[in-house]
Image (tube, rainbow, N blue to C red):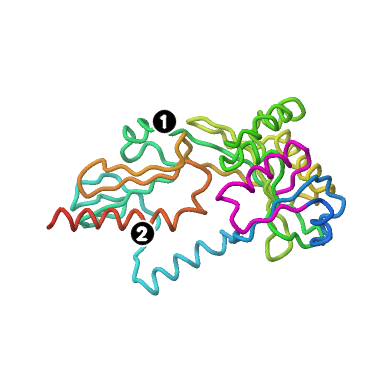
Amino acid sequence: MLGRRDEARAVLEAFMDTEMAVDCQLLSRAQAEARWPVLAGAPITAALWSPHEVRVESRLAIPRLAAWLAEAWNVHFLRPAAVQTIALPQIQTSQGVVMAETCVVCPGDDLVSLYPDVIAARGVTLCSLQMLRLASPGTTLPAPLMSDLGLTRYRGYADLPEAAVLAARLADEQPLHLEHGIHLIAVQSADGSLVVGDSHHYGDTPGPFAAQEVEDLILDEYQAATGRSAPPVVERWNGVYASADEDMFMATPEPGVRLVMVTSGTGASTAFAIAEETIADLFGRSREAAE
C-alpha cells in the first residue's frame, strides 16, 4: 500500500495499531526504496507491506480447479445449463432434472432467476468495473500495489478515524476518481504484464460500454502512485458482481436449500472459506434435525 500523502501515512500508522496488521510492516520512503529499488521515484511518504497476499491467475486457476474437482472428486459439471426451478428432491435445469436432498444456490450476479424476492430484500444491486492489462513495464513489482484511494474504500482502513481526514483531501483533489469509484490495484502476471484496475459503478442494469474517461483516470492514478508512465494497454474488459451493504449473506428460502451470495468484490478471496462454513452449517444442521 503506497501512501503518498501525509494523511495517508496517518491512516497506515493507525492501521498498524489494529489486530489486522499482524506481521505487516510500515516502511518509510527510504526503507521501501532500499528494499525494492523498483519503487525509486514513487512519490510516497510511507509504504505498508503485507506478507499475507497471494496472487492467483484466475483465467488459469479456475479451469484447472474445475478439472481437478472432476478428476479427484468425481464432481459432475453441467455446461451449459441453467437452473430453472427447485422443488427438492428435484432440480429442474435446461439439461434435465437433477435429484438432490440438499441444494446450495450461488447465483453470482444473477439477481432474478432464483429467489429474486429474497435477494431484493437484501438490497442487492450490481457493480460494474473496468479493468486493464498493461504490457510488461520491464521491471518486477515486489507485490500487488495499491494507493491512497484504496484507504478510503476498504473498510479495514476506511473505518479508522484518520481516514476521514484523507477522504476530505481526496474529495478536493481527486473528485472525478471518487465519482467513478476508482482505486488502484496493480498486480503482475507471470509473463510480466500488469493487471490494473479499477472503477465502480452501481445499478440494476449496467451497460456494456467502457468509458475512455474512466480508463484515463485509472492510468492517471497508476502514474501518480508509482511515479512511472503507464505501459501500453493490451487488454480491456468489464466485470460485474453483486453488491450490497453487507459483504455476503446466507439465507434458507426453503427447507434443504441454502442461498449464498458474496455481495462485494471479495468473492475470489473469500469463496473457499465461505464454502467451508456453508457446508459445515448446512450439514451440521441436517444432522441435528435428524437426531
At 48% from the left and 30% from the top, the residue drawn is 204
Q: Quadrant of residue 35?
A: bottom right
Magenta stretch, residue numbers: 1-27
- The crowd level at tag 1 (other Cα within 10 Å; few <14, some 14-19, many 20+) is few
Relative image position of residue 218 (x, y in whole percent): 72, 40
Q: Which residue is mark 1?
A: 123
Left or right of 85 on screen, residue 28: right
| Nearer-the-camera pick, 91 or 15 | 15
Q: Compared with residue 277, is residue 213 higher up or lower down, i.e. above or below?
A: above
Mark 2: which amino acid? Answer: Leu
| Nearer-the-camera pick, 279 or 136 | 279
Q: Is residue 227 magenta?
A: no
- The CA distance from mark 2 to mark 1 is 30 Å
Residue furthest toward the front? Answer: 17
Q: Secondary structure at mark 1?
A: loop
Q: Earlier in the sequence, mark 2 or mark 1?
A: 2
At 38% from the left and 33% from the top, the residue drawn is 122
Left or right of 98 on screen, residue 37: right
Relative image position of residue 17 (x, y in whole percent): 62, 47
Q: Which residue is mark 2?
A: 78
Left or right of 117 on screen, residue 143: right
Mark 1: which amino acid? Answer: Gly
Q: Quadrant of residue 116?
A: top left
| Nearer-the-camera pick, 10 or 240 | 10
At 54% from the left and 31% from the top, the residue drawn is 202
- The crowd level at tag 2 (other Cα within 10 Å; few <14, some 14-19, many 20+) is few
Q: Compared with residue 32, is residue 249 higher up or lower down, i.e. above or below?
A: above
Q: Secondary structure at mark 2?
A: loop
| Quadrant, the C terminus | bottom left
Relative image position of residue 222 (x, y in whole percent): 76, 45
